[in-house]
Amino acid sequence: MNSADQHRPGEVHRLRELAFAGRLASAALAATPVQYAALSAAAYELAWPLVFHRITRPVERRRGHWRCASAMTRLADECVDGFHDDVEAVVADLLHNAKARIISLEAWLTGRLTASTVDGHRRRRGLRGAQQRPRMPKWLDAALGGDKWLGTLAVRMLEWAGVPETAGAGTWPLDSWAAFRAEVTGDWAGSDPRTVLADVHRVQAAMRRRPGWYADYIERPLGGKIAPVASPPEDAAGEVNPLVAMTPEDRADDVLVAIAAGAVDAIAAGLGGGEDPEALVVRVVNAAFGAGSGSDQLDRRPGGADASDELVSALLADPAARGRIVATAIGIVCGE
């Protein structure tokens, strides 16, 4: 039995019956608020696992959010809202468009996941006053001199203005854009948040040549984001950033996420170069997580240091454990 059928057996059974009879959309349209809520809840139970595994998990992996990609219950606050938005879009699409006979609701939902979530994303952007499909206007491209990176940044700014998330206490996600700038321009040494902020100012100056356009698609949507609760000091790039109290464990989690992302990139590059998968994974994992100097743990209490690096080295030395590690790593890199 499907897990959704176990959690809401009566509601899900009713949903399946209406879909099989080709009457789901008409029943939803004629439903009372209580009846519609029951149909929505049943549809949500069916939709959320499909959305998480086919939409959310691949997106979180591309972002390097490995914790978020591991389970729906481990989604970070900044990611869980987008997940629920996508599920709601899928549910709304089902209850509005299920007008013909549906034999398998899961198969029907799966076939429409991308279209329904993209449509929901665009609709939410429109409600916030942002462009539904951000594109580079010809006049803006000309004002930027046809520069590839600045044009790409302009589109990113239009996209960012229309999402509800914030970049901490700053306006723009300069850190992630710095890495993206390096990829686009090849300027790895010169791509830092300060440089990106200067690029943002150049793009803004060009956009403001049409004040009405800038107000409609940048200023107004940005104004709809949730403001930070305090005004912390500026950082070296001129953007404000919150001073968040972090424990050594919190800091260790952030470091591990960054190391894991680098390890995945290294394994992917090695596989692309034809390296032996097992030797490659062992080399990269041992270098990233094996026994090291422990200098990042000097702020721990005596006896409170993390011995996970020693555990990783021990696991890699065990043939059975090493095989599981290699299989898991290859699966993550290949999206399996």
Image: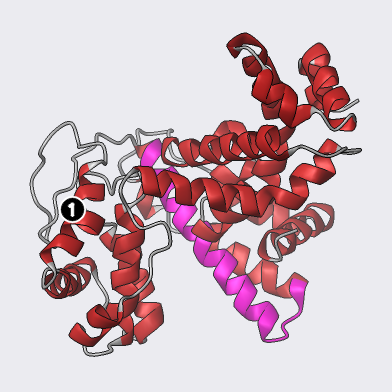
Q: Based on the displayed image, in which of its 4 quarters is residue 203 positioned?
A: bottom left
Residue 23 picture location, percent across and down: 81, 28
Q: Is residue 232 left or right of residue 250?
A: left
Say left or right for 287 vs 2. Answer: left
- Is residue 90 rendered to the left or right of residue 257? right
Picture coordinates of residue 146 (x, y %)? 28, 89
Residue 179 x %, y %: 36, 70
User: Foreground residue, 261 or 112?
Assistant: 112
Mark 1 residue type: Glu
Residue placed at 33% from the left, 34% from the top?
247
Q: Residues within 10 Å of mark 1 (few under 14, many from 20)?
A: some
Q: Is residue 229 above or below residue 188?
A: above
On screen, residue 259 above or below 52: below
Q: Quadrant of the C terminus?
A: bottom right
Q: Which residue is mark 1?
A: 219
> Residue 285: percent from the left, percent from the top?
61, 63
- Viewer can see residue 335: yes
Q: Quadrant of the N terminus?
A: top right
Q: Main secondary structure of the magenta part?
A: helix
| Residue 270 within the segment the image draws in magenta | yes
Q: Is residue 328 above or below residue 154?
A: above
Residue at the (19%, 41%) spot, across then down: 242
Residue found 44% across the figure and 39% down from its top: 305
Question: Can see residue 190?
Answer: no
Residue 281 lies left or right of residue 133; in this view the side is right
Looking at the rendering, the stretch of residues picked out in magenta corresponds to 249-277
Name the colouring of the figure: secondary structure
Q: Would you identify the image quadrant in which residue 20 lies?
A: top right
Q: Magenta includes 328?
A: no
State the image quarter where residue 35 is shown. Answer: top right
